[in-house]
Amino acid sequence: MYAVTVGSFLFFTALVGALTWFFTRRDDHSSSQGYFFGGAVRSLFR
């Protein structure tokens, strides 16, 4: 039972990490506006 719990925790943690990387891999991290989400949020309210 303990191994199933640890295994499922590791699986879902890796899944969240992989999905986060997948959706943010093309973001511009070279400037502070691209690094933080402020640029994306500001564009929603224009």
Image (cartoon, helix red, strand yellow):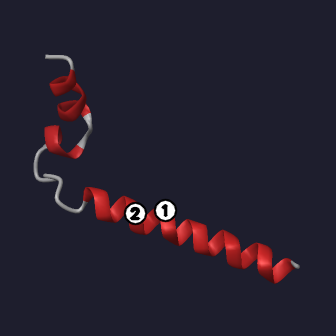
Image coordinates of residue 24 in percent, x first then y, are: 27, 56
User: Is 33 displayed left or right of 12 in the figure?
Assistant: left
Looking at the image, the residue that sits furthest to the bottom is 3
Residue at 15% across / 37% down in the picture?
A: 33
Circle on res. 19: 2
Label 1 Cα neighbours within 10 Å, binned few <14 / some 14-19 / many ≥20: few
Residue for point 17% across, 33% down: 39
Residue 40 in picture, x, y percent from top left: 20, 34
The residue that label 1 is drawn on is 16
Question: Residue 21: which quarter of the image?
Answer: bottom left
Mark 1 near mark 2, Cβ–Cβ under 8 Å? yes
Amino acid at dot 1? Val
User: From the viewer's perspective, is 7 left or right of 27?
Assistant: right
User: SS at mark 2?
Assistant: helix
Question: 31 or 23, which lies in front?
Answer: 23
Indicate the position of residue 35 as horizontal and vertical percent values.
21, 46
Q: Residue furthest right?
A: 1
35 with respect to 21 (left or right)? left
Say what amino acid the circle numbered 2 marks: Leu
Is 8 on the left or on the right of 20, as rendered? Answer: right
